[in-house]
Amino acid sequence: MNRVLIDLEALQHNIGRVNTLMAEHGASWSLVTKVLCGHSESLQALGALGVRSIADSRIANLTAARELKTEFETWYLRLPHMSAIGEIVAVSDVTLNSEIATIEALNAEAATRDKRHGVIIMIELGDLREGVLPGALVGFYRRVFELENIEVLGIGANLGCLSGTVPNIDQFMQLILYRELLELKFEHELPLISAGTSVVLPLLQSKTLPKSINHFRIGEAVFLGTDLVNGGTLPGFRSDAITVEAEIVELREKSLVPVGELSAVTPFESLQTEDEISPGQRGQRAIVTLGQLDTEVQGLTPIAPGHVLAGATSDLTVVNVGGSPGELEVGQSIRFRPNYGATLRLMTNRYMEKVLVPPLGAFMAAHDDGSHAERVPSVLDGLLS
């Protein structure tokens, strides 16, 4: 049986680490839940772990969170699209925006619902993703401030999300200066600068990030512990919050080098180099019931030392497990640690069982003193009426 395992103790640990960093910096944060793909048990667990502010890029995922009747405040991360304005206003408290026509549509929809909708206006700072060009900011904000059902909560940026460039202090200082300019020009407070993501956490840990950057959208660091700047795992974080098990259906000693002429196109590029395998070398090869149809196999790392991905088809993956099978046998499972891309594929896979470890009820019973719920402060308290 193939399963995605979601470790609640590891999640609790990583949420606690982010809470500590935020408290030291004087910032608030929203947990980006895209990787959960609306999985209701996982969302329920986040509520039990004290999470109050979640951010997602899919309407269905935010709808699933709202249906749990938790205290979640909800941020919609993808730029709002005109074809779904009604749904977006219904399920989200805040959206990130870069088009005036879209904000006007959000305003009209919010008016019909007799509510105020929060917006962060995104600024282009070099990642070449969404964002208003700096030279157009004053005119843009002038029009937005005229909308009665829109609450402008601040400014924001996405850095290092598309191009892979590492965010730098100069970019954050630009944001701070733009906010000061806009506040002076319009005599209107912009309480949030939302520019922190998982890629910014190393700057936060080194205490070099300006204090004015006061809202973070954190996902990958919580669910995978990834250090997106230096590689590996962030100091103090756990990388085992999400793992995947795949069942062994064949375990045999075979040649480690294929026989015959290789075609120009191979379905999978082995992670073992020719230097690591000598001609005629043999070893134990395990075939597991997980393939490219299920996930991005190249994004999986076997947890056991010495195990190496050898190849994959749409339905199966082959793992070189060494010279001896050890305690492995057919019917058992091999565990892998997925990267972000592989995790997204696994969680959207309807064939893949998702399991909380331990089960939520058992986890809460083991922490009946309330230690499981290190409450994450709300971002919007006092900001959105």
Image: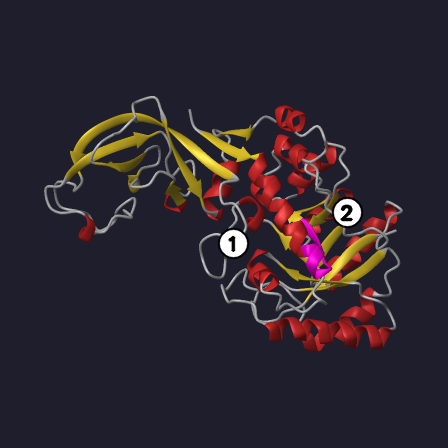
Q: Which residue is mark 2?
A: 89
Alpha carbons under labels 2 and 1: distance apart: 35 Å
Look at the picture and state if 366 lies above or below 270: above
The N terminus sits in image quarter: top left
Q: For the point 58% across and 36% down, which residue is it?
A: 9
Look at the picture and state if 344 lies above or below 135: above
- In the rendered structure, which amino acid carries the disc numbered 2? Val
The residues colored magenta run 22-30
Of helix, strand and loop, which one carries label 2? helix
Whether residue 307 appears in this view of the structure is yes
Q: Residues within 10 Å of mark 1 (few under 14, many from 20)?
A: many
Q: Residues within 10 Å of mark 2 (few under 14, many from 20)?
A: many
Residue 83 position, x and y percent, is 69, 48
Numbered badge on residue 234 = 1
Whether residue 32 appears in this view of the structure is no
Left/right placement of residue 273 relative to residue 65 reads left
